[in-house]
């Protein structure tokens, strides 16, 4: 069992990127989750990750990962939208824009490190 944990820790992501349009909301604490596909679900709760912009690779903060929870696209609700600082319609549209036709997603909850 300990070996399995070591592998998971070794494979845990240490960096995260966001589109530049989300930086202000993250820094203000208005956006406290991100919803990603399976290729980006390897964050370990309790870990600290460096965060930069997707477009330029500009570092802007550190985040502490609180949880990683699987969710289906059809299960997204107003609570998730509020945590993303969007309406539910905006959230669904953004996810479909980034991950067209996706069903299985992961909610990654985080908090900004001071």
Image: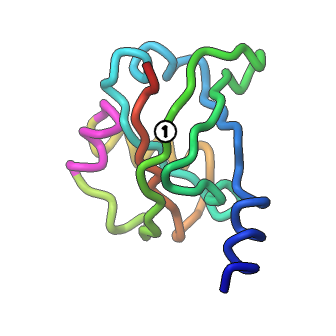
Q: For the point 77% across and 20% down, which residue is it?
A: 57
Which residue is more in the foreground, 83 or 91? 83
Which residue is more in the foreground, 21 or 106? 106
Residue that numbered label 1 is attached to: 64
Q: Position of residue 91 (x, y in %)?
A: 39, 42
Asked whether, in this view, residue 101 is left or right of residue 75, the answer is right
Q: Is residue 61 above or below residue 5?
A: above
Which residue, as the protein is rendered here, is positioned at the far front?
2
Q: For the point 39% across and 20% down, which residue is it?
A: 25
Asked whether, in this view, residue 5 is left or right of residue 73, the answer is right
Residue 86 found in image quarter: top left
Q: Position of residue 52 (x, y in %)?
A: 67, 23
Which residue is more in the foreground, 55 or 28? 28
Which residue is more in the foreground, 24 or 100? 24
Q: Is residue 4 above or below residue 84?
A: below
**Which quadrant: the C terminus?**
top left
Q: Give the residues in magenta.
A: 78-86
């Amino acid at each position: 069992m300990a070996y399995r944990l070591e592998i998971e820790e070794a494979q845990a992501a240490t960096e995260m990127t966001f589109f530049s349009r989300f930086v202000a909301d993250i820094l203000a604490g208005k956006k406290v989750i991100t919803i990603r596909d399976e290729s980006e679900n390897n964050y370990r709760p309790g870990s600290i990750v460096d965060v930069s912009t997707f477009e330029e690779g500009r570092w802007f903060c550190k985040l502490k990962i609180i949880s990683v929870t699987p969710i289906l696209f059809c299960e997204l609700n107003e609570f998730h939208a509020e945590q993303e600082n969007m309406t539910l319609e905006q959230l669904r549209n953004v996810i479909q824009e980034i991950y067209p036709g996706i069903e299985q997603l992961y909610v990654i909850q985080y908090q900004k490190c001071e």
